[in-house]
Image: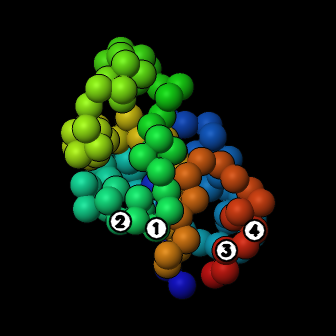
Amino acid sequence: MKTVFIGYPPCSTCKKAYQYLEQLGIHAEYRNIKEDNPTKEEIKDWISKGISLNQLFNTSGMLYREWNMKEKRLTLSEEELIELLSQNGMLVKRPIVIQGDTIIVGKKEKEYEKLKD
């Protein structure tokens, strides 16, 4: 089954997560989140599969702080928030691992172990 890894190459957490998948024997297609942002359709699909909109925000990122997203998340509509996430991948929490209907947001090794290649 195809596995897609959405990450940011300079990010040490992404590097470790990708290496862990490789150690498990799971080869994932790497997608650079800065060059290839998740689309609005992808984000809506992830939400429909149980990922909350809140899980998708990179709350520790510089852009999140610079744009005062903590406040904006309280006032903007879900559609507006999805639009912002789709416009700038650096707002999106990473890594995201997708395999079929399974979507894992963040470095979660125990969940990676449940994936199959």
Q: Secondary structure at mark 4?
A: loop
Callout 1: few (<14), some (14-19), or many (20+) C-alpha neighbours within 10 Å? few
Residue flagged by tag 1: what amino acid is it? Lys
Residue flagged by tag 3: what amino acid is it? Leu
Residue bearing the label numbered 4: 113
Callout 3: few (<14), some (14-19), or many (20+) C-alpha neighbours within 10 Å? some
Q: Nearer the viewer, mark 1 or mark 3?
A: 1
- In the image shown, does 23 or 81 lie closer to the viewer? 81
Residue visible at 63% across and 40% down in the picture: 13
Residue bearing the label numbered 1: 49
Residue bearing the label numbered 3: 115
Residue contact at pointers 1 and 3, CB within 8 angstroms: no
Residue bearing the label numbered 2: 45
Residue 102 percent coordinates (x, y): 55, 71
Q: CA distance from mark 3 to mark 4?
A: 5 Å
- In the image shown, does 26 or 92 lie closer to the viewer? 92
Q: CA distance from mark 1 to mark 2?
A: 6 Å
Residue flagged by tag 4: what amino acid is it? Glu
Residue 64 percent coordinates (x, y): 40, 24
Q: Nearer the viewer, mark 3 or mark 2?
A: 2
Residue visible at 42% across and 46% down in the picture: 53
